[in-house]
Amino acid sequence: MDDNIRSREIKETIDKYPEVGRILDEYEIGCVPCSVGSCFLSEVVGIHNLDPQTEATLMYRIEKAIYPDRDIPEPKVDMTKKPTPKKINYSPAVKNLVEEHVLIKRLLAMIPTITEYVETSSDVEKDLIMGCVDFIRSYADKFHHMKEEDILFKYVDEQGEIIQVMYKDHETGRNHVRQVVAGTESGNKAQIKENLLGYRELLTQHIKKEDEILYPWIDRQLTDTQVGELFQKCSAADASVGEELPRRYEKFINDLEGKFLKEVSK
């Protein structure tokens, strides 16, 4: 591929050639809605760790979209061979972060049912909503996100676009939670529902980006020494809060599922 294309900022490329955005969407590369957009095309492709066959086809299609009249040789791709998804092998510290996502996703799965329950109840059940807020603030944010912000992200360029997107997601999530608290205090059910659902949508995509794209990309940057160092730092952070905190919030989710699981599974 033309090096000039690889070194273009992706937002500028999509604005000038909308077909490129549609092609990236086909490959589930979410550059179109990104609010920053300063990644180079080469970085976008590299960070998604595509298999060689998929990458060659993608880059060919992008180049054809930008230069439709140019004679560009098609990549030699074995169409009978289906691309095999790459198995993700996380480093120990990152694997623990992925496992923490599982507990967070269990809350996210219940949010539609919780908001429906709140909406149909005669009064706002403050203990229920504030229990969810406490889980989000204490477990998802202070326990989990802080390890990302204070430790993990320090191993890469924090000014890089993908890290800035993660920071922005974290702050957007905190704003949703503030609005949930305000709605709970004022008894505004619509405000509670809007922001809990907004948080769910945000975190669902955020976790997917981290598990499938960001975490593997960071792991690929780390030396063996850094892998060990990262594990030690994250372990020390966990030890500083003690084993009781994650156990307490797992119990909270278990209890919440005991109340709402039947509705969730319908």
Image: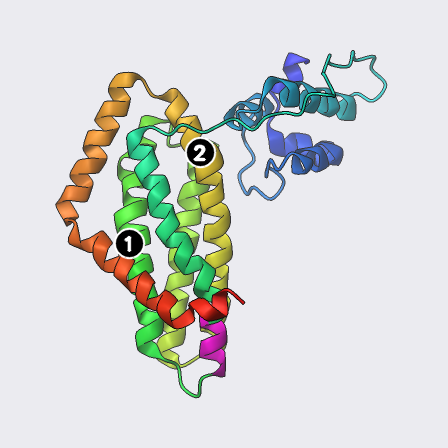
Q: Is residue 55 above or below residue 233?
A: above
Residue at 13 percent across and 45 percent down: it is 240
**How many labels, in total?**
2
Residues at marks 1 and 2 touching, judged by CB atoms closer than 8 Å: no
Q: Quadrant of the C terminus?
A: bottom right
* Camera-nearest residue between 224 and 195: 224
Q: Can residue 22 be seen in this view?
A: yes
Q: In this view, does 201 lie above or below 168?
A: below
Residue at 31 percent across and 67 percent down: it is 255
User: Label 1's element?
Assistant: helix
Q: Which residue in the structure is indicated by mark 1?
A: 139
- Inspect the magenta stretch and tell me whether residue 166 lies in it: no
Residue at 43 percent across and 53 percent down: it is 172
Q: Is residue 153 above or below residue 227?
A: below
- Magenta residues: mostly which secondary structure? helix
Q: How crowded is mark 2: few (under 14 residues within 10 Å), some or many (20 or more)?
A: some
Q: Which residue in the structure is indicated by mark 2?
A: 214
Residue placed furthest toward the right: 69
User: Label 2's element?
Assistant: helix
Residue placed furthest toward the bottom: 122
Tell me where the magenta segment starts and ends, as one range.
114-120
State the image quarter where residue 158 is shown.
top left
Residue 50 screen position, x and y as percent: 57, 24
* Camera-nearest residue between 123 and 20: 123
